[in-house]
Image: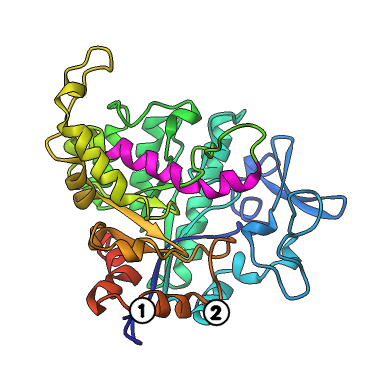
Amino acid sequence: MLPADTRIMSADDHLIEPAHLWVDRIDPKYREACPKIVQVDGRDGWLFEDEVTHIPMGSCRPLPGHPEWGYPPAPGTANYDEMRPGCYDPDERIKDMDIDGVWGQLCFPNYTRFAGHRFYGNVKDADLGLACIQTYNDYLLDEWCATDRERLFGAVVLPLSDIDRSVAELERVIAKGASAIAFSENPTVLGLPSIHTKHWDPLWAVAEEAGVPVCLHIGSSSRLVTTSPDAPTGVLVTLLGINALMAGVDWMTGQAVDRFPNLKIMLSEGGAGWVPYVLERADKVYLDQRIAGSEELGFMEKGSRLPSQVFADQIYVCLVDEHFALRSLDDIPIDNLLWEGDYPHGDGLWPNNRSYLDKALDGVPEADAVKIAGGNLRGILPR
């Protein structure tokens, strides 16, 4: 059971970028080109490089009187005056956390995209993209988190298409108090090298030394798994955890974890019920000598540890509204299980997260319940 005085910590929440985040803060030479809110047929949208992106209401929490599904255009959009101020205002966010019974949140971006890839890759001006990333990180750390540094923590974004700039930006934001890196669950989808190369080693070295975890949020590759182009949306949404499963297997069976044995990997918003099967299966594959020596399958370079041990040492998973994982605690390392509220996104249970956790953890030993509800996250965030 969860003691009444437990300070709950969420491993994954989002901030809806304030309407004037960039125009008020970016280097003046980029002010005309940076993202700004415009209205198209009465609906708010971000304008950047000739593209308008509306704000999905499913990523927000509506004010009373506005529907959770939003307004046209599809799939349902939100204007700033239709969403709770806690979505974009840090002072109001603290109030909404108090309503929810949540003490702390690790916050990811929204419009910026979960690995910051709004501003690299297909961006026309790489210098503008870098300026947008740095402006976001400065706002996140110097204003959003500075509202209450004991309760608000920030996952920074990096210009991942340029490893040297990424390392430089990580070093810069670590000095500002960055709590985590919002990396990609599968950088190859973004046209970047995989984690099975040594391309990212300079970044991992800085993160490991600083004790900053690397977070792989579902959707941070911009490709969610489904079965066919005509499959209904319910198929894609049901399979959301597959992205985290694949990313977890990449890391458990790859070599980067051996080169950086103190690096922490968080699989954000990917659930945890799949963990027992994957650990069992990955260990079986690791021990299968037929695979290790197969020219047809490609020789498998093994790490120094069983994948299940790699998971226990370095990989963390998050549960939102999930009960199966809590019934499987004998098969999931308890120290690797985090809870997330996902505010203000629709997968979360605001304003009922505290009551949900009280019920969900009722049969869990007190020490384990405290770890899941916040203790584990406190242990991996840099101090």
Q: Earlier in the sequence, mark 2 or mark 1?
A: 1
Q: Which residue is mark 2?
A: 95
Which amino acid does the dot numbered 1 rest on?
Answer: Arg
Q: Is residue 366 left or right of residue 8?
A: left
Q: Can residue 306 be found in the magenta stretch?
A: no
Determine whether 149 is above or below 139 in the image. below
Instruction: Point out residue 168 in the picture as x, y percentages from the top left corner.
Output: 36, 39
The residue range painted magenta reads 232-251
- Residue at (37, 28) in percent of width and height: 194
Label 2 residue SS: helix
Label 1 residue SS: loop
- Residue at (70, 67) in percent of width and height: 83
Q: Is residue 54 visible?
A: yes
Q: Which residue is mark 1?
A: 7
- Residue at (20, 39) in percent of width and height: 283
Which mark is nearer the camera, 2 or 1?
1
Q: Is residue 182 left or right of residue 315?
A: right
Instruction: Point out residue 289 in the picture as x, y percentages from the top left corner.
Output: 14, 25
Instruction: Point out residue 278 in the picture as x, y percentages from the top left corner.
Output: 30, 44
In what quadrant of the picture does the C terminus appear? bottom left
In what quadrant of the picture does the N terminus appear? bottom left
Determine whether 370 is above or below 332 in the image. below
Q: Can residue 234 be found in the magenta stretch?
A: yes
Which residue appears farthest toward the bottom when viewing the image?
4
- The residue nearer to you, when weighing 29 against 380, is 380
Determine whether 146 is above or below 278 in the image. below
Q: Is residue 98 left or right of residue 371?
A: right
Q: How many marks?
A: 2
Disc 2 versus disc 1: distance between alpha carbons? 15 Å
Instruction: Point out residue 257 in the picture as x, y percentages from the top left corner.
Output: 22, 39
